[in-house]
């Protein structure tokens, strides 16, 4: 059983496991094709890639990946990029800008929390941050400081509110990022489409703008019949969106078979007319 899990997070974004722990866990779960798709950073991927090279392990085939926060016609969209050149200058430049925007947003949240009378500082946020500082890190810090009881309260009571009131542009346009990834020799898939507002209106538009994949999440399917997205030229991708080990959270929870993965890859090759950067 050679499975593909194309959506995982390490502690370089908001996941708990380090790259080496993710690799070991993937081997345990019989995952052969693994993509580390940290939010707006390649640091976890780069670390994992080095570990695999140094160990001469052939058990895991690591797919270049990243999860971009984007927006399209007012909807927030997480976009998964695959198979691109990880050294592409433009792509790395955009990731750097996204990092800066994340930090700026976190500072805005801190200022507002302190205005509301809470005592929380930059150091409190940075505990456990290796790479991308995300809203989840802020939520954990708020929980540790006793500002909220549950992480979900941090979002419901503060983080969603601050996100809406944040005056700066936080995300890049989805179509712009699809072009960026295509130019870097890779393709994009839309992550957890069931969480996207107006998904059924937006997905056909993105299919016309170069989106290739659609992440199909068991029990959360937005198209009952795969034919509906196939007719738009979209290909199924899958992954666990793994963040931490738990009863209901494990690598391979959503996966592609080896055949399905190769089908996705060969369609990516076709779409990029042979200019795909990652080969295996
Ligand atoms: Zn996501
Ligand atoms: Zn994710």
Image (cartoon, helix red, strand yellow):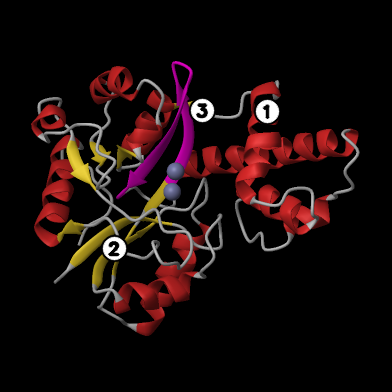
Q: Secondary structure at mark 1?
A: helix
Q: CA distance from mark 2 to mark 1?
A: 34 Å
Query: What label does residue 172 carry, if any?
Result: 3
Q: Is mark 1 within 8 Å of ligand 1?
A: no
- Residue 196 lies in the magenta stretch: no
Q: Which residues are magenta?
A: 67-83
* Vertical comparison of 72 with 26: above or below: above
Structural crowding at the residue carrying mark 3, measured as other residues with C-alpha within 10 Å and reported as few (<14), some (14–19) or many (≥20):
some
Q: Is residue 87 above or below residue 189?
A: below
Q: Is residue 189 rendered to the left or right of residue 227?
A: right
Q: How far is the residue under mark 3 from the one under mark 2?
A: 30 Å
User: Please, what secondary structure does the residue beneath circle 2 have?
Assistant: loop
User: Which comes sooner in the sequence, label 3 or label 1?
Assistant: 1
Q: Which label was assigned to residue 212? A: none
- In depth, the one of 135 and 84 nearer the eye is 135
Q: Percent position (x, y) of residue 257?
A: 14, 59
Prevailing secondary structure class for the magenta stretch in the rendered image: strand
Q: Quarter holding the N terminus? A: bottom left
Residue bearing the label numbered 1 = 161
* Residue at (85, 50) in percent of width and height: 121
- Residue 148, can we see it? yes
Q: Quadrant of residue 228?
A: top left
Q: Taking 101 as reference, is 237 left or right?
A: left
Q: Nearer the viewer, mark 3 or mark 2?
A: 2
Front position among marks 3 and 1: 1
Q: Tell me if residue 82 comes above or below residue 201 in the rendering.
A: below
Pinpoint residue 226: horizontal percent, then vertical percent: 12, 36
Q: Which residue is mark 2?
A: 252
Return the disc, 2 or 1, that comes first in the chain's sequence: 1
């Amino acid at each position: 059983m050679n499975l593909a899990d194309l959506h995982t997070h390490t502690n370089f974004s908001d996941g708990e496991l380090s790259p080496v722990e993710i690799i070991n866990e993937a081997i345990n779960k019989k995952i052969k094709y693994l993509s580390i798709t940290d939010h707006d950073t390649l640091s976890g991927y780069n670390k994992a890639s080095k570990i695999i090279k140094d160990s001469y392990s052939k058990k895991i085939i690591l797919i270049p990946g990243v999860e971009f926060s984007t927006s399209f016609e007012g909807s927030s969209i997480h976009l998964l990029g695959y198979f691109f050149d990880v050294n592409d200058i433009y792509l790395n430049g955009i990731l750097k800008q996204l990092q800066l925007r994340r930090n700026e947003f976190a500072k805005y949240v801190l200022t507002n929390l302190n205005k509301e009378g809470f005592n929380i500082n930059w150091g409190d946020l940075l505990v456990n941050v290796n790479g991308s500082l995300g809203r989840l890190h802020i939520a954990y810090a708020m929980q540790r400081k006793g500002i909220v009881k549950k992480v979900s309260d941090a979002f419901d009571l503060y983080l969603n509110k601050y996100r809406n009131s944040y005056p700066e542009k936080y995300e890049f346009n989805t179509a712009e990022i699809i072009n960026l990834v295509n130019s870097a020799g890779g393709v994009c898939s839309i992550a957890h489409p069931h969480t996207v507002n107006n998904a059924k209106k937006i997905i056909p538009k993105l299919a016309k703008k170069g989106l290739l994949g659609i992440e199909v999440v068991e029990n959360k399917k937005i198209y009952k019949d795969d034919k509906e997205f196939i007719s738009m030229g979209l290909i199924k991708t899958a992954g666990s969106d793994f963040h931490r080990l738990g009863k209901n959270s494990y690598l391979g929870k959503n996966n592609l078979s080896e055949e399905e993965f190769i089908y996705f890859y060969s369609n990516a090759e076709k779409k990029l007319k042979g200019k795909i950067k990652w080969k295996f």
